[in-house]
Amino acid sequence: MWRFPSAAGPHRVDVLGLEERGCVCYYRRVESVRDGQTRERVMKQAIAGVTPAESEETTIMEVWPSVARYSVARVLGRLFAIDAGIYVFKIGNLIALAAIPVGLALYFFRLLPAVRVSGRSSRDPSLPQDRSVIPHGSYYKLTNRSVHELCNEVHLGSGSRFVSNLAGCGGLAIGVVLVVLHYFVFGELLPGAEGNFNSPIPSWVLFGLAAFHVVAGLGLLAMTMVLNKSLQFVHGEVTRSVQLNRFDAIRIDRLDGQEWFDAGDLVFLEAGHETFKLPGIARPEAFRSTCMKAHMAYVGVQDALQTSS
């Protein structure tokens, strides 16, 4: 109970915390005494953008890791940081210019979805988690309850056949187009069709690409019809997570080569012990600050609920 002085007279305000429609609301009862009469007014005020963790889990922030999480990129980062040279013609800048194809390959490599061997979902606790063939396609999400590491995955399983049929038909179409292109460019449908195996290397490369797309397309279509399984894409499969009350500090570790990318690893600590780690985050100070604010809000609400109960 609070009292506020006012020119109109004393006011008594009673504030109670409520949850309504998934947002945090305040129920405010104002009793004003004026001219010997008591007036009561009830107002409901909501805090914009705030959702209680007990109501539902909502996303606060999503970040994708930097290429600095890979050892190859960290080696390049150490080379890019070489400051010997004149003006912009420094050794590090010249190496960075020459390594543009490698940088592009690493950038798109981290976005590729992981390939799961079987169709089991790691969300089912009764099933063992499958190991992905290639460690990529992961990103990080901060919610009002936890910090998650998620992964986009591709696997074979039961479900919609749209993606598998589309990929199979697309592979066949690309293969046919490449074969037609090979005919118009080199004057023959297949290299070595007339017993002459001295065809130029570009002819064999183009034919190899066409054969790969045709075989892959036919394989996907046959697998869909015979095995009754199709290509499934899973967006945001949770692989690791930590609750917001499982840490009280976050340390930033910068490995050699990550300084050039302005990246680092976030290490979540509880009483000085590591409980969680997110590698290779670009501009880690911003994500660390947001995680600590979410932690303080979550812990504060939990303490308030325990005190009120």
Image (tube, rainbow, N blue to C red):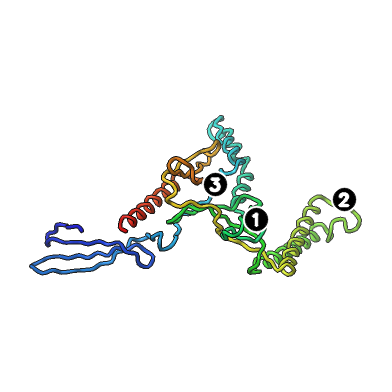
Residue at image coords 32%, 59% = 309
Q: CA distance from mark 1 to mark 2?
A: 38 Å
* In-image side of 59 versus 223 (left or right): left
Front in this rendered view, residue 56 or 66: 56
Q: For residue 2, what is the image quadrant?
A: bottom left
Q: CA distance from mark 3 to mark 1?
A: 20 Å
Residue 198 got which mark? 2
Q: Name the front one of labels 3 and 1.
A: 1
Front in this rendered view, residue 66 or 194: 66
- Residue hosting label 3: 66
Q: Amino acid at mark 3?
A: Ser
Residue at image coords 59%, 61% = 234
Q: Amino acid at mark 1?
A: Val
Near mark 3 (Cα within 10 A), the count class, few <14, some 14-19 or many ≥20, is many
Q: Amino acid at mark 2?
A: Asn
Q: Secondary structure at mark 1?
A: strand
Give the mark count.
Answer: 3
Does residue 225 appear in this view? yes
Q: Does 224 appear above or below 259?
A: below
Near mark 1 (Cα within 10 A), the count class, few <14, some 14-19 or many ≥20, is many
Residue at image coords 72%, 64% = 220
Q: Position of residue 130 (x, y in %)?
A: 63, 55
